[in-house]
Image: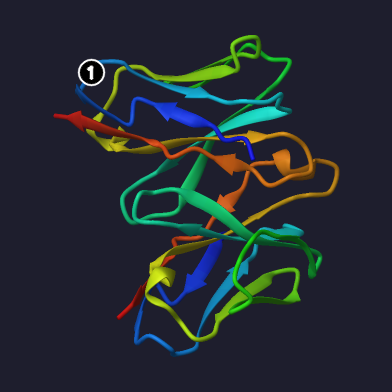
């Protein structure tokens, strides 16, 4: 089955900097979702972007989707220590389970 | 609080034992899921129930048996536990009606299972 893959696997930045994570996938999708997982916790939904959308914003988060390149990016602006977590992309190809990538582990250093 | 809850949070047991994990959601969702997250953080779906009916059963050993007594509950029973079953198990829920699987999923806090 196809799978989203995040890049990089790990990212370490200073507080206040921007963090960019990428997700690539293999087949056509209905939508792509980004989730955050804090250490020892369940996943929390951040943003859903549909295949006919190119960009979406939510607070300090910006998600882009390029269906021609089969890729998405998640940008966190003005990062905070509390943004330290693992970030996962999940792809929906319609009536099949969401397929999660392996995640990007973000560390924001105060 | 509206949420997806799981019990227990930690489960340590011996190989060969049988154990159960319970999940409840009070979000009014009609679909519930069980995921397994391994030590490398890879999250893989195991089962999904829609209105108490099994709709997804990925390649999972038949030692794992889900049970959904009603729309708000999805339990997972594991027989003859093996070392490789050690992982974090997450329950999740979503609304399937009118949306398919693309609706956002709400996750429980996870159950860390350790098989010795």
Which residue is painted at 61% across and 76% down in the image? B75
Q: Chain of mark 1?
A: A
Left or right, B98 with respect to B20, comes to right
Q: Quadrant of residue A12?
A: top left
Which residue is painted at 61% across and 66% down in the image? B60
Q: Quadrant of residue B109?
A: bottom left
Left or right, A52 with respect to A84, comes to right
Q: Nearer the viewer, residue A35 or A105?
A: A105
Please tell me how many numbered marks the rendered image carries: 1
Residue B54 lies, in percent from the top left, at: 78, 66
Q: Residue furthest left?
A: A110
Residue identifier under label 1: A16
Q: Nearer the viewer, residue A109 or B57?
A: B57
Residue A20 lies, in percent from the top left, at: 37, 18
- Check disc 1 and report its element: helix, strand or loop: loop
Image height of B80 relative to B103, above or below: below
Image height of B29 relative to A95, above or below: below
Q: Quadrant of residue B62?
A: bottom right
Residue A110 lies, in percent from the top left, at: 14, 29
Residue B22 lies, in percent from the top left, at: 55, 77
Which residue is painted at 38% across and 85% down in the image? B15
Quarter of the image where the C terminus of chain B is located: bottom left
């Amino acid at each position: 089955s196809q799978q989203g893959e995040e890049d990089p696997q790990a990212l370490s930045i200073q507080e206040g900097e921007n963090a960019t994570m990428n997700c690539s996938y293999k087949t056509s999708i209905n939508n792509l979702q980004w989730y955050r997982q804090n250490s020892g916790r369940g996943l929390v939904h951040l943003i859903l972007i549909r295949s006919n959308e190119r960009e979406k914003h939510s607070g300090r988060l910006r998600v882009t989707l390029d269906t021609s390149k089969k890729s998405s990016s998640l940008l966190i602006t003005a990062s905070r220590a509390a943004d330290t977590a693992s970030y996962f992309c999940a792809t929906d190809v319609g009536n099949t389970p969401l397929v999660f990538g392996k995640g990007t582990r973000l560390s924001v250093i105060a | 609080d509206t949420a997806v809850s799981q019990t227990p949070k930690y489960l340590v047991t011996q190989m060969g034992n049988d154990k159960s994990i319970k999940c409840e959601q009070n979000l009014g969702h009609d679909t519930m899921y069980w995921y397994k997250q391994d030590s490398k953080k890879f999250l893989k779906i195991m089962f999904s129930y829609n209105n108490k009916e099994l709709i997804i059963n990925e390649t999972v050993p038949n030692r794992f048996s889900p049970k959904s007594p009603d729309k708000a509950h999805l339990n997972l029973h594991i027989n003859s536990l093996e070392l490789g079953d050690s992982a974090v198990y997450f329950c999740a829920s979503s609304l399937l009606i009118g949306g398919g699987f693309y609706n956002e999923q709400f996750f429980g806090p996870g159950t860390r299972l350790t098989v010795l």
